Image (spheres, grey):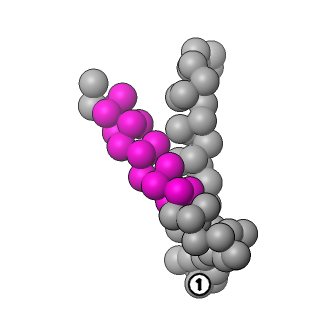
Amino acid sequence: MNIKMNDWERAAGLFVILGAINWGLYGFFNIDFIQVVFSTSPLLKQTFYGGIAASGLYWLYKIVK
């Protein structure tokens, strides 16, 4: 399968995948990977979560469209 994506779609896809992995780790092992990686910088952690949310909304828009 050959899917053509622009840079924004690739970045959004990466954020969605990382978010899914984070939720899986949290659900199965109670490990918040984003908290572990960005624990020293609350602003980076909040920015990353915001990026995941924006990416999820973007892909939802693309799917519905």
Classify 5 as above or below 58.
above
Under mark 1, the amino acid is Asn
Say which element carries label 1.
Answer: loop
Local crowd size for mark 1, using a 10 Å CA cut-off: few (<14), some (14–19), many (≥20): few
Q: Residue at x 60, y 31 (%)?
A: 10
Q: Residue at x 42, y 52 (%)?
A: 53
Seen as rendered, the residue at the extreme bottom is 30
- Of the 4 image quadrants, the one containing the C terminus is top left
Secondary structure predominantly adopted by residues drawn in magenta: helix
How many circles with numbers are drawn on the protein?
Answer: 1
Residue 12 as seen in the image, left or right of residue 64 = right
Q: Residue at x 58, y 71 (%)?
A: 42
- Of the 4 image quadrants, the one containing the N terminus is top right
Magenta extent: 47-63
Residue 18: x %, y % from top left = 61, 54
Q: Residue at x 57, y 47 (%)?
A: 15
Seen as rendered, the residue at the extreme left is 64
Residue 25 showing in the rendered view:
no
Residue 3 showing in the rendered view:
yes
Residue 31: x %, y % from top left = 63, 80
**Magenta segment: does it hold 15?**
no
Q: Quadrant of residue 45?
A: bottom right
Residue 53 as seen in the image, left or right of residue 16 = left
| Front one among 61 and 51 | 51
Residue 11: x %, y % from top left = 60, 35
Q: Quadrant of residue 21?
A: bottom right
Q: Quadrant of residue 62?
A: top left
Query: What residue would you read off at disc 1?
Result: 30
Classify 10 as above or below 21.
above
